[in-house]
């Protein structure tokens, strides 16, 4: 049997430069050393509120498209976590940054947000559960990688002086790391059931790699957007 | 403002004979007086297991199609309840009737089941959230009506001598009645937002009534199936 | 490279008895020898009108789900043929049997029709293009097989005395045979792109075979329905 | 009965500034006077090839979601026109600009393209046929308005000296104007069936207006993209 995490690792290996540009983006590095302008972070937080709603819709779609109870339950658990835990945490966290839920709900959605979320949703509608999980993976797993890396990086400022320390701790924390691990394992499982032991040798692989690369590129676009607050 | 439950009451009023044929079906009456052959009930339970999976998928679709957090959360709560409470209860309950989960998962799906569940899902894909909620309502709300009626009906046998007493008590019970009430209220709310105060005066009403009548008719077909156990 | 038609042949080989029960159904045999009661045929024609609409919707879905222009164009051509040629022929043909389009449009949809068409549509929504094409194939290709077989069968009455002769000639005719051939070839092509040279060795095969068997079984249900005209 | 084109006119009236920014965009004006850099036009043409594919998918979705033959046939005719006429014309036209179909098929999809097309597709999946037609209308009808305006505008150069003259003539031409008129009429018809005579008084109107404004804004983003050719 293939080693755990093989499918996700193989997907990353198809676009190493895009992946690095995403997880090591200037926005990320400046979260780490605390130098990110607060207007950028607030812009990011507001758009992330909208993002989470569509991301939750994507997990609802994954539940709809699952052909077994295990996958349905995993997707439903993500949906529940996003709607009832993540969004509440996000709202509470944003309140600390002076952003009310009403204000965020009224924000115009940035094009980078539209492009990313609707690409994921359309990929899910067009293809099967595996296509959808691949499109979701750069976000779910990438944030865990970013959190862990910032936590370990000597350039990071993890003192109370870094206004983004809580953000880093959240994604570096055990709870989020386990969520990402579960997503990686589901990818292995669903890929095995559809493509066999070596997913990367399957005829569909190039299409899956293209989905992964596009989603990763759209994550870069999301960070780029964060660096350009309106007004 | 229209009285609570108005939309559902108006839908029922468009097909009173079909509705009565469903909630007062021979299968239901024989659950009430305990005279239903056990082979019929077992056949019903096995198909209901498959039904619950597709019904859960329909609520996942409702979460995907919601355009606000309140509706998303209500749909996600139903999905969670179906996957993590109802199905577990069902599996445990069925074990008492000698049906293992593995056996139910391997059953061929009856045509009446395919017709009903896929009609609901296709109605949801084709239309909007309101079309989908209307298609779901005969089941969610009808079972509460059936439970309450059997509990109150003097012909019912609510002693330990009726092997279906637990089934009646479950749907007559407060917990399930509240689930049905929440569905009725969501229907009011979503219809008001899309059709205004008097849904039955809206141009779309005849189409919604047709969806409701078809779903009700397919519930009748489901009970009919229950009365015809294979072999 | 695998021989043409391999995927469809392999699918049939997974459920030979169901396949035979479908293509050699009593309804089919009695079309062949002309002994089918006309009420049965009229009932079938009316339901087939509704069926064609949902079948057209399934090809629209196939166009939506295609990831290349060749498949999009093939699905769009089927959609166009169904809406603009088949339905017109059907309406004209039915007029000869005393069924007006208005009458057919007002018919209640039989449960067997709902079960079959909505199963195909939900299979398409849930899975990818290959799942959908597999679900569509028993109808498209099966009718060509039925037509060719009736035409060649010594028990068939191909004289003007058989009221169903035109029906047989239509499906045995070169035009329809070519439509079916194109569907068989598309199945080969799409399966090769997703599963490789030997589709039947792919992990997904058992799921595809289950879709095929269910669709075939629902075709049997459609013929059964034809034998039971209402009233 | 409301005057023809009322729904589309009312939608435009909800966002007059965005609409003007779209139809009178710098990209458009410079097509008119011939001053647009050719690199911009080539960039636009390449992305438009990808756009047309997803736009065709959106009409396939409209056919799938139609609940009557008239709407299905209109959507199928648009799908056919896009796949078999527009795309061929586009490919032929692009060849004149030194862009081969193979080159266009290999282009990376711009974020502005992803945002626009996937927003339209997701709007269609989430809502009903009316939501989808509203999302499609700024493109279909806007291009007719742009063509007619450029053709009539005294600042336009309609001599052979303007390399974009053919483009203007195509969208100003009778054939395209009729396509746009048919889309406007379908919007009236579908809105009347779902919202009644005065669509703008229906509770759903604000949501439809939001869809229209977002699609218009994404058209602006598409022209903006055209002004920024890569490299």
Image (cartoon, coloured by chain):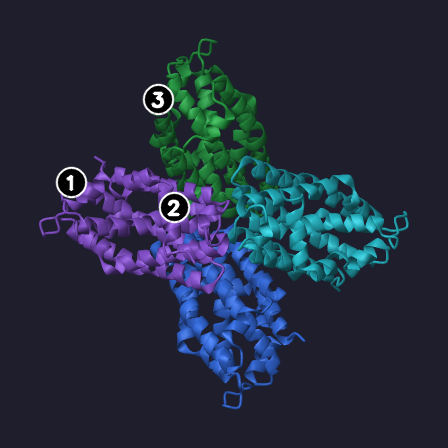
Chain colours: A purple, B blue, C cyan, D green
| Mark 3 → mark 2, Cα distance in angstroms | 41 Å
Q: Which quadrant of the figure has residue D37? A: top left
Of marks 1 and 3, the one in the foreground: 1
Q: Position of residue D134 (x, y in %)?
A: 46, 39
Q: Position of residue B197 (x, y in %)?
A: 42, 56
| Mark 1 → mark 2, Cα distance in angstroms | 33 Å
Q: Is residue A122 above or below residue A69?
A: above
Q: Tell if the residue under mark 3 belongs to the same chain as the one under mark 2.
A: no
The kind of secondary structure element at disc 2 is helix
Residue positioned 54% across, 43% down in the render: C193
Of marks 3 and 2, the one in the foreground: 2
Task: Tell me the chain of label 2.
Answer: A
Q: Is residue D37 above or below residue B65?
A: above
Query: Dividing the image into 4 quarters, which one contains the N terminus of chain A?
Result: bottom left
Question: Is any atom of residue A3 visible in this view?
Answer: yes
Q: Position of residue C223 (x, y in %)?
A: 73, 59
Residue positioned 26% across, 48% down in the render: A104
Query: Dividing the image into 4 quarters, which one contains the C terminus of chain A?
Result: top left
Marked residue nearer the N-terminal end (1 or 2): 2
Q: Which mark is residue A37?
A: 1
Q: Residues within 10 Å of mark 2 (few under 14, many from 20)?
A: many
Q: Which residue is mark 2?
A: A11
Q: Tell which of C159 and A127 is nearer to you.
A: A127
Q: Which mark is residue C194?
A: none
The kind of secondary structure element at disc 3 is helix
Q: Which mark is residue D26?
A: 3
| Mark 1 → mark 3, Cα distance in angstroms | 33 Å
Q: Position of residue A213 (x, y in %)?
A: 38, 41
Question: Is any atom of residue C51 visible in this view?
Answer: no
Q: Tell if the residue under mark 1 belongs to the same chain as the one under mark 3.
A: no
Task: Tell me the chain of label 3.
Answer: D
């Amino acid at each position: 049997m293939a080693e755990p995490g093989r499918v996700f690792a193989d997907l990353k290996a198809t676009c190493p430069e895009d992946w690095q540009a995403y997880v090591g983006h200037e926005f990320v590095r400046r979260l780490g050393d605390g130098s990110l302008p607060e207007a950028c972070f607030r812009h990011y937080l507001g758009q992330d509120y909208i993002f989470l709603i569509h991301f939750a819709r994507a997990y609802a779609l994954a539940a709809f498209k699952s052909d077994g109870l295990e996958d349905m339950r995993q997707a439903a658990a993500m949906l529940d976590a996003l709607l009832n835990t993540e969004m509440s945490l996000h709202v509470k966290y944003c309140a600390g940054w002076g952003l009310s839920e009403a204000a965020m709900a009224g924000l115009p959605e940035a094009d980078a947000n539209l492009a990313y979320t609707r690409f994921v949703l359309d990929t899910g509608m067009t293809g099967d559960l595996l296509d959808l999980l691949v499109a979701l993976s750069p976000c779910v797993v990438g944030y865990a990688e970013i959190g862990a890396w910032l936590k370990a990086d000597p350039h990071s400022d993890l003192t109370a002086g870094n206004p983004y320390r809580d953000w880093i701790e959240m994604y570096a924390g055990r709870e989020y790391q386990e969520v990402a691990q579960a997503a990686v394992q589901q990818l292995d499982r669903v890929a095995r059931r559809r493509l066999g032991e070596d997913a990367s040798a399957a005829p569909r692989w190039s299409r899956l790699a293209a989905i992964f690369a596009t989603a990763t590129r759209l994550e870069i676009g999301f960070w780029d957007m964060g660096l350009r607050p309106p007004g």
